Image (cartoon, rainbow, N blue to C red):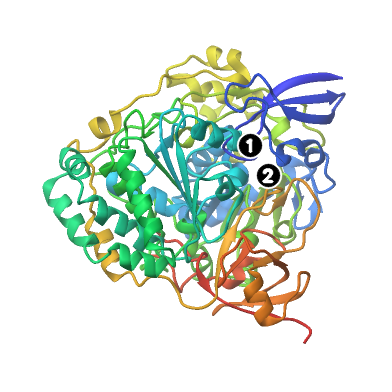
Amino acid sequence: MTEQRSYCRICAAACGITVTVEGDSVVKVRGDIDHPISRGYTCEKGRALPQWHHGSSRLDAPRVRGVEVDWAEALDDLAGILSDVSLTDGADAIALYLATGLAYDSAGQVSCGMWMGSVGSTSFYTAATVDNAPVLVAAEQIAGHPMLNPVWEPQHSRLLLLLATNPVVSHGYGTTLADPVRRLRENQDAGGRIWTIDPRRTESAALSDEHLSVRPGSDVILLAALVRELFEGERCRDALERTCRDDEVLRLARAVLPFDLDAAALATGCDRSDLLRLVADLRERHGKVAIFCGTGSTMSLDGILVEWLRWVLLVMTDSLDVLGGMRFNRGVVNQLSPSRPGTPPLDGPKSRPDIARVAGQMPVAALVDEIEAGRLKVLVITGGNPLSAFPEPDRFRQAVSLLDALVVIDVAESELCDLATHVFPATGQLERADLALAEQVAFRSGIQFTPAVVEPVAQRRPVWWILGSLAARSERPMFGGAPADSLSDETILRGLLGHGPFSADEVIEAGPHGVDLNPEYGWVRELMTPDGCWSIAPEAFCVRLARHRGPELGLVLVPRRESAWSNSVRFAGSGDEPVVLIHSDEARERQFVTGDWVAVTSAHGSLVATVSIDDAIRPGVLSVTHGHPGSLTGTLTSFSEGVDPLTAMPRASGLPVRIEKLGM
């Protein structure tokens, strides 16, 4: 047996791992005690990598229309379809969807963009418009670039607000957080205070100093009220006046004027005295504030307002782009630079003029419309499962039958593979070399590398090889025309490192422990904003706030994460059964007991789940795991109704629902 250091690529936390290998078998994974960031920690998903790697569902051979073929036949067949579609319908009739399963395959992720350029198509979709678009839109409007993301520094900050996020399970959202429990406790031991604002007493809330169990959808009014209260303090007004334009400060003050603490107490269902203590903490820890938001807010009706007001609170407490608050990572490979003025935006979906692109990407909410309208003829899906992530999964199933080709590039079987015309088996994370490219959300400011732990078996190939071999069959090959078989993972990764602050040799030699850049402060406002000012009060956001209607009345549904699952993929544990959490008061009223089968129904559809009575969740709220393949929460949501015109996001949090026992 041998041991090899690597890092986990299930999520962006990139925890260091030590992998025990016997021959070509992965025997065990444990945390790397010497890793400078994760410090020996790894979650149950990471420890289950051997079972996942050797799972019976792994894809081993290409398939064309359900029949196993060799790579040459599979690629030739698809290349012919792509050529015909491009000639008859145009390059934009070929689309690619890049999802979370490929987000941490660095060479694969970059090759997707390269392949779209080779095809000449601008029909590029990602999971960002499923769960993350408000983050990108707010950053672009306020700071000038969609990838600018504030990162927590627990050694410096003294007040952390966790808003609709649970980093103990998710490992951070906006700031990656390896070893989350110890990081939170270390911050508290150094004098920090942590508030969790969530309708459920999550694992993170249990570790917090304070927990506000708010009504879903009330967070906008709460944050607006906090901003209004802080305006009364001289230091907060001064922070705004130093870093923002006068007209925008005035517009912001007017926008939040209707939202006082009484309104916030009524909307949230919290005591006014608790809100006053939160205001006092914000004032007392001026300059040392950090705020995380998560999918509980980004997937809600007005998630964009939550993201905007988060930035406002950070700016007015002098906690943005400064030591002590939240910093920004410039990046090693994806180094950020100001957007070029005068660059014309790409056209949005013709079938959905009500929504536009986000960060240059086509909105997922328009994908099915584009297929049904005949504008998309080929769809390539890399590392994702729209059946579990998108609204209206039945409509998606029917729409893909209209395509000339549905191509699935993935590591494991799924229902999506059964619908596909072409299925291509990709290497898993232990079979490929990688760089940690989640740079703008990374806890560290540097980068880390891992070689492959084991060689790929069967006919599994890297995603860059699959797309490069496909492009080689066209008139616009990738990789400068070099044959894919002459390249390697490391060759591709060395090319990505060619223009950064470190040489490829430095990064590769450092391996999974990585190399660090010194954190930088003040560079964003100085270099990225057009006049050195935060655009703190975009007109569209202020208008939207004036129209905000507050939380829904009655029973509502919110999403959650599970420690054993990564979206639709279960890595550890047992039990594929979907579970709905419900407070004992609600269960008693409906005569439910744990284990009952129930139907949860919205205006758009229903799902079936088993009841779990849990008083950690607020009365009036239900919770189902987002992306769970058994529950298909997309059946409760819509591609058309409730889609935010500012972010193109379908509404999936704070949904009005009803619940009924089955078999009565």
Quarter of the figure that contains the C terminus: bottom right
Residue under pointer 1 = 469
Query: Do labels 1 and 2 touch, CB within 8 Å?
Result: yes
Which kind of residue does numbered mark 1 sit on?
Answer: Ser
Q: Point out residue 522 in the picture as x, y percentages from the top left corner.
A: 28, 29
Residue under pointer 2 = 75
Label 2 residue SS: helix
- Give the alpha-carbon distance from disc 1 to disc 2, as whole Å: 8 Å
| Dot 2 crowding, Cα within 10 Å, few <14, some 14–19, many 20+ | many
- Tell me: 423 left or right of 525: right
190 is higher (above) or lower (below) than 381: above
Judging depth in this view, the residue of 586 and 447 nearest the camera is: 586
| Residue 287 lies in quadrant | top left
Judging depth in this view, the residue of 447 and 403 nearest the camera is: 447
Identify the residue shown where x is 46% and y is 26%: 445
Which residue is situated farthest in the left direction here? 246
Judging depth in this view, the residue of 651 and 618 nearest the camera is: 618
Q: Point out residue 98 in the picture as x, y percentages from the top left corner.
A: 55, 48
494 is higher (above) or lower (below) than 309: above
Quarter of the figure that contains the N terminus: top right
- Tell me: 318 left or right of 209: left
Residue 347 visible in this rendered orientation of the protein:
no
Which residue is situated farthest in the front direction here? 273
Identify the residue shown where x is 58% and y is 51%: 82
Judging depth in this view, the residue of 445 and 252 nearest the camera is: 252
